[in-house]
Amino acid sequence: MLSLNYSAIFLLLVGAITLCHASNGDRTQFFHNCRQNCERTNCSADGLEIQEQAVNFYKQSIFDQIFQWSCADECQYGCMWRTVAAFAERAWPIPQFYGKWPFLRMLGMQEPASVIFSMLNCIMHFRMLRKFRREVRPDSPCYMLAHIFGVTCLNGWIWSSIFHTRDFPLTELLDYAFAYSIVLCTFYCMVMRMLHRYSLFLRGVITLAIVSYYINYFAYLSVGKFNYSFNMKVNIATGVLSALGWFIWCHRVRTRRPYFRRILRFYILFALAMSLELLDFPPICWILDAHALWHFATVPLVSLYYNFMIEDCRTLRKEKVLSGGYSSYFNKDI
């Protein structure tokens, strides 16, 4: 009987909405009424009583409770799937909700595939950083640069896992901000690699400028409404500058440093992997979407970047030793 009432509401109210708006599930009157009725019926208490109602009414797992799925969250989740079912019955396109496709929650995680693949990236960076430390001597040029890159990536992927587990305004901000820190760090590593023979003062000034820029950008993201389009443009622009710098370097050293192919291969494959973000389709089995595939595609690419850094640091150290120290080492090519 309840499902019939919802269907009647859907036909009367959603049918009058334009096709453009009907593709957005959270804008439909069907979803709005479903959520409102659910919250009024099941979330009328306060404080701990609401959480107890959510546990009892929705049969929450221990993971749902750990990740703080409230009664209102459960109503939103349940009504989302009722709306999806109503769209599917009428052979209408699968709707999005609050800018996202509907995902099947698993172990309390909103987007389980993205969480798992983000964790895999984090594990891969950790393992490759350990490999770098095993195979590269601490007195090698650019040794600390690899650690800066590794720690930045570890932090970014940890927050990616947290955000895809539970989407809050704060976790969203930190995910986007620290994701950009990875992109900016690759640019910083490229610049510092090109200037590693120059004075410590010059490199310090550039480091301070980039850190100051990032702090200012972080503050910009934190104030007012989040500008997704602008943030994407900034990420792309920074990534393109980084890739361009490495491509120029590869061209200049192609006859002297055969391992240049590793960094070249990394950026080519990274660009191909990033093209997955251009795809937009409902999640396969309500779990695997284009964004999750993008995270998965970056996992094997991590080793390419670290293997390049390992070989590069080894080569630079050999050149330093053979040249008798930095006095004549400064005069060699990059």
Image (tube, grey):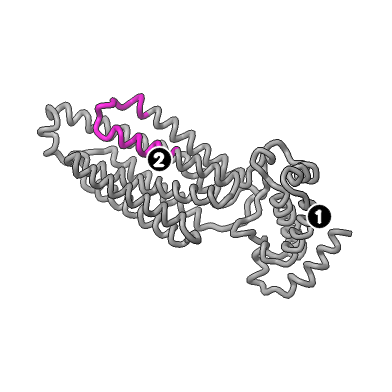
Tell me residue 280's x, y (percent).
56, 58
Please, is residue 84 above or below residue 142 in the view?
A: below
Predominant SS of the magenta segment: helix
Query: Within the image, what quadrant is residue 37 found in?
Result: bottom right
Residue drawn at x 62%, y 56% is 101
Q: Which residue sits at x=33%, y=42%? A: 263
Which type of secondary structure does the marked residue at label 1 adopt? helix
The answer to whether the residues at label 1 and label 2 have Cβ atoms under 8 Å apart is no
Q: Is 333 left, or right, of 241 in this rendering?
A: left
Mark 1 → mark 2, Cα distance in angstroms = 46 Å
Q: Quadrant of residue 202?
A: top left
Quadrant showing the C terminus: top left
Q: Let me know if residue 117 is in the magenta part.
A: no
Q: Which mark is residue 41?
A: 1
- Marks 1, 2: nearer the viewer: 1
Residue type, numbered disc 2? Thr
Question: Which residue bears the numbered disc 2?
Answer: 152
Q: Amino acid at mark 1?
A: Thr
Q: Is residue 30 left or right of residue 268?
A: right
Q: Residue at x 80, y 42 (%)?
A: 56
**Front-most of residues 122 and 163:** 163
Q: Is residue 318 visible?
A: yes
Residue 6, picture quadrant: bottom right
Mark 1 and mark 2 lie on one chain; the one further toward the N terminus is 1
Compare residues 233 and 201 and report the one nearer the observer: 201
Number of marks in the image?
A: 2
Q: Position of residue 171 (x, y in %)?
A: 54, 47
Residue 24, position in %: x, y?
65, 64
How crowded is the residue under tag 2: few (<14 C-alpha within 10 Å), some, or many (20+)? many
Q: Which residues are magenta?
A: 132-154
